[in-house]
Amino acid sequence: MSSSRYFIRRFKRITSSSTIQLLTICFCAFLAIRWVIRHNHDDDNAEKYKTLAISVDTAKVDWFKLYYVQYVTTEEELCNALIVWSEIEEIGSRAQRMMFYPADWDLDEKDTTPSKPDELTARARLLRTAKRAYFVKLTALDVLGANHPERSQWVGSYTKLLAFGLVEWDRVLVISPDSTVLNNLDELFLFPSAPIAMPYIYRPGTEPTSWTYSSQLLLVEPNEKLFEAVKNEIKEKGSDGNDMDILSSLTSRKPLRIPQRPYHFPTSEFRQHTHTTYLTTRNSSDTWDPERIMDEAKVLQFDDSVPKPWIKAKQGIMNSNMPICRERDGFGATDCRDRAKWLGVYETFQLRRESVCGVGFEVRGEVDEDRGWDGRLDMMVEVGK
């Protein structure tokens, strides 16, 4: 008994020492920082999902209960959505395809322009193309219509949250129309079960620890209870909120993290001086190779300092924001691959838009009086320009 009291007194004397207290605080701070660093990005998720136990080729999956979904409320969104459907059809997919559009749109609507008698309007033509060429199931939705009293609640970023109400399906992948699909996404439907899954990303040019979720891809398991919660949250927040505000408050669990690499490749990554953060979302020893990175990327996001590719951009804006050409070792050679890829994705989008959407959706450049900008992208190769 006396010996235990002795050790207790000794322990109290030791722990009351300022040196010991300082060391204890430092050790706890070290553990806290280490935990934040390890849990503030998606390395662990990326490795886990690279080795999924089941594959799209061997799994007994009911693909008729899994859907790619897009919502459109304007003709601009409709054209962009059609481009996405064309990419998915070209790549191939097992899951079903569904697009929701306003109920006041008519697939048989005729153009009233005198020079185009009996021709379909642009949106009627694009809707029919989605159905016939890309095998998309079309569903008119009253809530998206201009005359519907609840329309104001669902336009804008809230629209994609309607996916929670699609309870007849097991899982839904909502793709924002301003995305570009580069490779097959079917494996996302086989990710671990979770009410919500989204890419967990950092934005180039921000602090490496500035990670956040992106709703450009939204993988949900439709649920009536969650859909009711969505509607209540929207009524409460009104026009002051956005989709991310709603998604972050729906469940006590954080959304399942979809790895940024390769599911969310931003065009601004080409302009970065270092690519360590993007590369280490999968392999800490990897090196930057823009051609290989683009080949592996699944979804491209036009997240940059220039206008979206369907909006007019002057040559001066493109020139001042394009990636620089870098010096290579030896003989003064230059490496312009980042610039070529960056310009290439914008040029490719413009050409595809004209090809898929047709007349009325051409990308026309504004005339730049200083540079004679004619709407095409020219590649300047001077180092650092």
Image (spheres, rainbow, N blue to C red):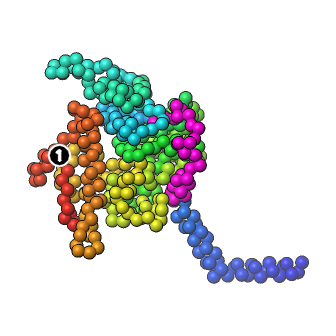
* Residue 242 in which image quadrant: top left
Given residues 87 and 152, the one toward you in this image is 87
Q: Position of residue 199 (x, y in %)?
A: 47, 49
* Residue 28 in which image quadrant: bottom right
Q: Is residue 316 visible?
A: yes
Extreme residue toward the front, this view: 58
Direction from residue 170 to residue 83 in the image, left or right: left
Q: Residue at x 26, y 22 (%)?
A: 120
Q: Position of residue 352 (x, y in %)?
A: 28, 40
The three-letter amino acid code for the residue at tag 1 is Gly
Given residues 358 and 237, the one toward you in this image is 358
* Residue 17 in which image quadrant: bottom right
Q: Residue at x 26, y 58 (%)?
A: 339
Q: Residue at x 44, y 44 (%)?
A: 184
Which residue was labeled with disc 1? Answer: 375
- Is 143 situated above or below 257? above
Residue range in magenta is 40-68
**Is residue 53 covered in magenta?**
yes
Q: Residue at x 22, y 37 (%)?
A: 362
Q: Is residue 228 visible?
A: no
Direction from residue 61 to residue 177 in the image, left or right: left
Q: Secondary structure at mark 1?
A: loop
Direction from residue 139 to residue 113 in the image, left or right: left
Quadrant containing the N terminus is bottom right
